[in-house]
Amino acid sequence: MACKHPRVKVVSREEDTEFVECLECGDVFESSEFKDMAIEEQEEGKDEEEEKPPARRK
């Protein structure tokens, strides 16, 4: 399973760009990419909920 980067720290700032490092796997990326990943995960979670059939009532 791929790292979801649960803990990150800022490692560099250049003009209007900020770079963060994942404290779990060591990947470094732009903070805007991190925000995009979080949005994609939320959208995927919504899609999965929509696919589930409604719970049956007793």
Image (cartoon, rainbow, N blue to C red):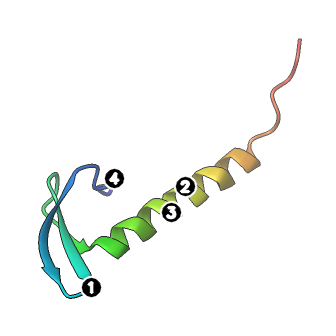
- The type of residue carrying mark 1 is Asp
Residue at the spot x=23%, y=74% of the render?
A: 29
Q: Is 21 or 12 nearer to us in this picture?
A: 12
- The type of residue carrying mark 4 is Met
What kind of element bears circle 3?
A: helix
Q: Is 11 or 6 nearer to us in this picture?
A: 11
Mark 2, Cα crowd under 10 Å, few <14 / some 14-19 / many 20+, is few
Tell which tag, 1 or 3, sits nearer the viewer.
1
Mark 1, Cα crowd under 10 Å, few <14 / some 14-19 / many 20+, is few
Residue at the spot x=40%, y=66% of the render?
A: 35
Asked whether, in this view, residue 1 is left or right of residue 27, the answer is right
Tell which tag, 2 or 4, sits nearer the viewer.
2
Of callouts 1 and 2, the N-terminal one: 1
The Cα atoms of the two marked residues, 3 and 4, are separated by 18 Å
- The type of residue carrying mark 3 is Ile
Please name the residue that numbered disc 1 is placed on.
16
Mark 3 and mark 1 in contact (Cβ < 8 Å)? no
What kind of element bears circle 2?
A: helix
Residue at the spot x=74%, y=42% of the render?
A: 52
- The label shown at residue 1 is 4
x then y, percent, for residue 44: 58, 57
Please name the residue that numbered disc 3 is placed on.
39
Mark 3, Cα crowd under 10 Å, few <14 / some 14-19 / many 20+, is few
- The type of residue carrying mark 2 is Gln
Q: Residue 2 occupies which quadrant of the picture?
A: bottom left
What kind of element bears circle 4?
A: loop
Of callouts 1 and 4, the N-terminal one: 4
Please name the residue that numbered disc 2 is placed on.
42
The Cα atoms of the two marked residues, 1 and 4, are separated by 32 Å
